[in-house]
């Protein structure tokens, strides 16, 4: 995935390219339910805040956090961080765990070798707190017709990633729009 | 640290936020990727970024850009500001040696059905006057000195 050219869900529809039935059948189905490999922890919170020079006292001042949020929380935009797999772990190869697996499944199944993410909508619910062990699941919401776009011929797809805490409270939903495509000649 | 808090009565449509400028370095990009546990090489390996992605250099990843937007918005509201929703459109990469500028404007204010007061903003991240990422964000702010959006739970929080 990369993000190097603007695209929206527009383009000329290619005739005679119905979505395969096995892909249509996956729309709306919850897949890839996963539990985080580690609990939410303050080291990453501080590293994230340091990376963007975020001095919000909610993340640095326990008294302020106690008063405003009932204790320390994580920056809401860190949602995806907590479900990122370790780069390596015993029994698996380094770098073998892909995030957003539906996206990669679609690339392979639809034979669209290139892909970019074009839009990302984050919605935040219950605060995420140090010690929480989050879980996520992925739901394919839609796949477009085959379209001619500036990048090549391809399809747009929309995937929801839903995040919950160990109490099964919804903490956030990340809705990603991807474009899988073939460059001319591929 | 940010300690003051905006309340709904202090916000009006058309209000412009002070710009935030930041000189991006390779450290900015790599630290942002590290903080978001993103080990994909286009965020730390210039050769890979150039040869596989066709970009001029490594570039900021999306989760770290989200963190920049969050920081920008809560610098404005203060810690009582509670993000509800952010919609990003990525239109181009941000590279080391870029000076990125975040700028925002209030596009709407409203009170929802459960009494939570909101501001909606358009925020642009640009480099050299060229927009690289567009965001539309909704953030809850206190309705007055006795309100705290963070105290809302369950159906009292409707982002």
Image: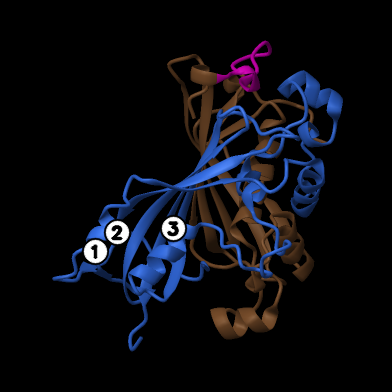
For image coordinates 50% across by 14% down, the residue present is B115
- Crowding near the residue tagged with mark 1, few <14, some 14–19, many ≥20 C-alpha atoms within 10 Å: few
Chain letter of the residue carrying label 2 = A
| Res B7 quadrant in image | top right
Q: Position of residue A36 (x, y in %)?
A: 65, 46
Q: Residue furthest top?
A: B146
Q: Position of residue A140 (x, y in %)?
A: 37, 51
Q: Secondary structure at mark 2?
A: helix
Q: Quadrant of the C terminus of chain A?
A: bottom left
Task: Point out the tag, 3 or 1, that comes first from the N-terminus.
Answer: 1
Q: Using the image as rendered, state which of residue B12 and residue A135 is in the foreground.
A: A135
Give me the C-alpha separation between circle 3 and circle 1: 15 Å
Provide the residue designation for mark 2.
Answer: A23
Whether A118 is among the magenta residues is no
Span colored in magenta: B143-153
Provide the residue designation for mark 3.
Answer: A102
Give me the C-alpha separation between circle 2 and circle 1: 5 Å
Chain B on-screen colour:
brown
Q: Are the two marked residues, 3 and 1, in contact with CB atoms closer than 8 angstroms?
A: no
Provide the residue designation for mark 1.
Answer: A20
Q: Position of residue B19 (x, y in %)?
A: 66, 49
Judging by colour alone, the chain drawn in blue in this rendered image is A
Q: Could one spot residue A94 in this view of the protein?
A: yes
Q: Main secondary structure of the magenta part?
A: loop
């Amino acid at each position: 995935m990369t993000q190097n050219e603007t695209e929206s869900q527009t383009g000329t529809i290619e005739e005679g390219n119905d979505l395969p039935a096995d892909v249509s059948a996956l729309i709306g189905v919850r897949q890839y339910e996963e539990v985080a490999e580690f609990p939410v922890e303050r080291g990453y919170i501080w590293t994230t805040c340091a990376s963007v020079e975020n001095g919000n006292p909610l993340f640095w001042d326990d008294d302020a956090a106690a008063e405003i949020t009932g204790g320390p929380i994580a920056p809401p935009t860190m949602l995806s961080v907590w479900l990122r797999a370790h780069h390596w772990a015993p029994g698996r190869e380094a770098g073998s765990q892909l995030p957003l697996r539906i996206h990669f499944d679609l690339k392979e199944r639809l034979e669209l070798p290139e892909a970019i993410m074009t839009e990302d909508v984050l919605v935040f619910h219950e605060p995420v707190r140090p010690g929480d062990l989050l879980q996520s699941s992925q739901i394919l919401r839609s796949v477009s017709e085959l379209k001619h776009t500036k990048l090549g011929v391809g399809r747009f797809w929309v995937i929801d990633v839903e995040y919950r805490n160990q109490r099964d409270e919804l903490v956030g939903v990340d809705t990603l729009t991807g474009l899988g495509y073939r460059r001319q000649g591929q | 640290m940010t300690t003051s808090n905006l309340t709904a009565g202090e916000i009006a449509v058309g209000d412009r936020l002070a710009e935030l400028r930041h000189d991006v370095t390779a450290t900015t990009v790599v630290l942002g990727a590290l903080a978001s546990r993103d080990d994909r090489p286009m965020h730390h390996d210039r050769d890979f970024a150039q040869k596989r992605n066709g970009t001029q250099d490594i570039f900021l990843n999306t989760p770290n850009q989200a963190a920049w937007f969050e920081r920008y918005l809560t610098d404005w509201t203060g810690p009582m500001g509670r993000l509800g929703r952010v919609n990003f459109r990525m239109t181009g990469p941000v590279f080391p040696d870029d000076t990125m500028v975040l700028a925002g404007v209030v596009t709407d204010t409203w009170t929802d059905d459960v009494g939570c007061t909101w501001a909606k903003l358009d925020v642009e991240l640009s480099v050299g006057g060229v927009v690289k990422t567009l965001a539309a964000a909704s953030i809850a702010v206190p309705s007055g000195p006795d309100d705290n959006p963070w105290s809302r739970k369950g159906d009292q929080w409707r982002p």
